[in-house]
Image (spheres, rainbow, N blue to C red):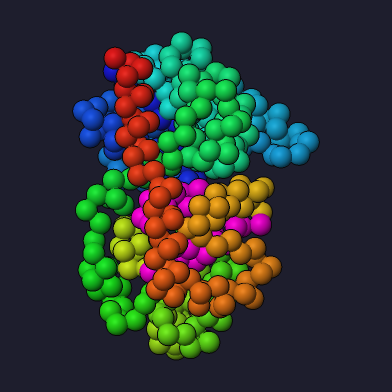
Amino acid sequence: MTIGIAAAGTGGHVFPGLAVAEALVNLGTPPEDIVFFGGDRIESTVVPEAGFELVKLNLAGFVRKFSTDNVRVLAGVAAGARLISRQIADRGVSAMLAMGGYITGPAALAARRSRIPLFLHEQNAVPGLANRMAARLARKVFVAFPAAGAQFARAEVVGNPLRPALLANPPNQTRALERYALDASRSVLGVLGGSQGADALNQAVQRLVDSNPGYQVLHLAGSNQHQEWTDRAAERPGWTVVPFEEHMQFFYAAADAVVARAGALTVSELAATGTPSILVPYPGASGHQEANALFLAAAGGAVVLAQPELGRLEHEVSRIMEPAERARRAAAAAAVGRPNAAVRVAVEVREAIQ
């Protein structure tokens, strides 16, 4: 029996979908019995590379204001639902898991028309529009954060599905430091600028390095911006810039503390790996990132710093890098981590078709 996974648009949707797919395979589902539905963005590369088939749809998300563009979006949703319905029938899809974002609408409608169980996963503490609209059609909504669970009638808090490579046999710090040619005698501050980079964070990193701190900086600057920051780092010892890290288990193993945006996947990875952090929510994320960050901060695992307050970053980093503070926040982060989310979702989806 085939399982459909609708995941598209951003890594925050796609990578948790891949984590569930890999958990399904580990539970005995053949990879050829899993089909992804998506579009032409990140999923068009990473899904086939992971060994799964991707059926592409030409869709766009809603414009969050009155716009005639939304008429075309609705037409695309209807057309996408028809295409997915045909795929469900042709491939014998017996259950659908939708990971939020613009692909969820047509996937949910197609599952309803085809009379197969629909499951949703919501990655953020503030539920997205697509999942809110599709929830009434779902058998269950899996959520990453308790705040989101309170907004759905049939919800279960499971955490964000994380890919097994992040958690299974993680490298020790010595191996991780060697990967980045870092000095084993100095502590490491990791900085996550995101896959596209985060200019405000990248600028703040330079100010940190210029203050001559006692720690060294491992900086994932973003694939779109790394060359500029690589050039600047070449003139400053103790600053290592990496454009993108496919194997994030090495980054977390190397870092004693992390400065990052507060995307749902990042927050979940920080908790699952027990990494203390300073989170700077992206101001344009409609409150999603702020809510994600506040969850980890309330547990004691993170400090939240609004972007206009980045002038305080040096002070906050100095505090969190102190050994006692670092240990306290690491334990607090780990206490709310949910490393088994992918398996929990996979088990329930499999049970629905057996």
In the rendered image, the vertical position of residue 142 relative to residue 184, given as above or below: above
Residue for point 52% across, 64% down = 278
- Determine whether, in the image, residue 347 is placed left or right of residue 231: left
Residue for point 67% across, 47% down = 286
The x, y position of residue 109, in whole percent, is: 54, 19
Q: Is residue 18 visible?
A: no
The x, y position of residue 26, in whole percent, is: 23, 34
The x, y position of residue 320, in whole percent, is: 48, 71
In the rendered image, the vertical position of residue 81 relative to residue 67, given as above or below: above
- The span shown in magenta is 256-283
Quarter of the rendering containing residue 91: top left
Residue for point 35% across, 62% down = 252
Q: Is residue 339 visible?
A: yes
The x, y position of residue 274, in whole percent, is: 38, 57
Inspect the magenta stretch and tell me whether residue 257 lies in it: yes
Inspect the magenta stretch and tell me whether residue 20 lies in it: no
In the rendered image, the vertical position of residue 180 relative to residue 112, given as above or below: below
Who is closer to the viewer here, 308 or 333? Answer: 333
